[in-house]
Amino acid sequence: MKKLINVLLIEDDPMVQEVNRMFIERVPGFAVCAIAGNGQEGAEKVASFQPDLILLDNFMPKQNGLETLQAFRKQDTDVDVIVISAAQDKETIRTMMRLGVVDYIIKPFKFERLKQALKKYQSFKQHMMGDGTIGQEEIDRLQGGPSPAKTDKQIVDLPKGLNQQTLEQIVQFLSGQSLPLSAEETAEGIGIARVTARRYLDYLLKSDQVQMVIEYGSIGRPVNRYQWKEKG
């Protein structure tokens, strides 16, 4: 059973707090353990609740998001951070990135964008748990770098109606999952239509890059699920 990822939400607007809380808890494997209205309160709740992940706003009273993140890094606080903010100036974003945020989401945003960030973080956390080593190919997949599917032959030989960018998004998403996914789950994960996801999954199946796992339920038709084939 996967460990639940506890999230601390640091956001000063009560309405946005509630919307973000509902968004977070719509993603399986995540739960909001606490909510703070500013950076100072957030720091106190980090100490009390020890969350795995913080969703951090920037424009807040008393202590803004950037100041809060800088304080966490100075104190070597063991927590990951996703920034969700209306701040779009390059200097702020560069500074946040230098301070090691997992992702940066600009308000307003859609649920699918937050879900994508959370699922990517979930995959990264699962792969990086414990001791041992990890290979370059797996690091590239987790960081969104070169993928096993990106070759000159595939760029030239893609069937009509498929494009390389969407293919790479699906490959990156699938290769980071520990369990097989349906076409609908894949579509939701990257924000495309289910029929589109199915076309790409069929292509990857025919090119022997994914394997199909048929899930039989007690009621209704079986569900086709797809899992990335590990090379080597």
Image (cartoon, rainbow, N blue to C red):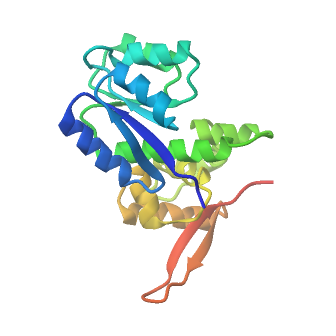
**x 51%, y 46%: residue:** 5
Residue 109, quarter of the rendered image: top left
Q: Is residue 75 visible?
A: yes
Question: In the picture shown, does residue 59 fall above or below 106?
Answer: above
Q: Nearer the viewer, residue 60 or 153?
A: 60
Q: Is residue 171 left or right of residue 196?
A: right
**x 58%, y 61%: residue:** 204
Q: Is residue 153 left or right of residue 37?
A: right
Which residue, as the protein is rendered here, is positioned at the far bottom? 219
**x 57%, y 47%: residue:** 123
Q: Measuring from the top left, give residue 178's x and y in whole percent.
A: 62, 57
**x 54%, y 70%: residue:** 225
Q: Is residue 81 visible?
A: no
Which residue, as the protein is rendered here, is positioned at the far left? 15
Q: Nearer the viewer, residue 210 or 95?
A: 95
Q: Is residue 18 left or right of residue 153?
A: left
Question: In the picture shown, does residue 96 fall above or below 32?
Answer: above
Q: Quadrant of the N terminus?
A: bottom right
Q: Measuring from the top left, give residue 228's x and y in whole percent.
A: 63, 59
Which residue, as the protein is rendered here, is positioned at the far front? 48
Q: Is residue 177 left or right of residue 195?
A: right
Q: Measuring from the top left, give residue 42's x and y in whole percent.
A: 38, 26
Q: Measuring from the top left, give residue 151's x and y in whole percent.
A: 65, 44
Q: Quadrant of the C terminus?
A: bottom right
| Number of numbered discs visible in the structure rendering | 0
Q: Nearer the viewer, residue 228 or 2?
A: 2
Question: In the picture shown, does residue 13 fall above or below 152?
Answer: above
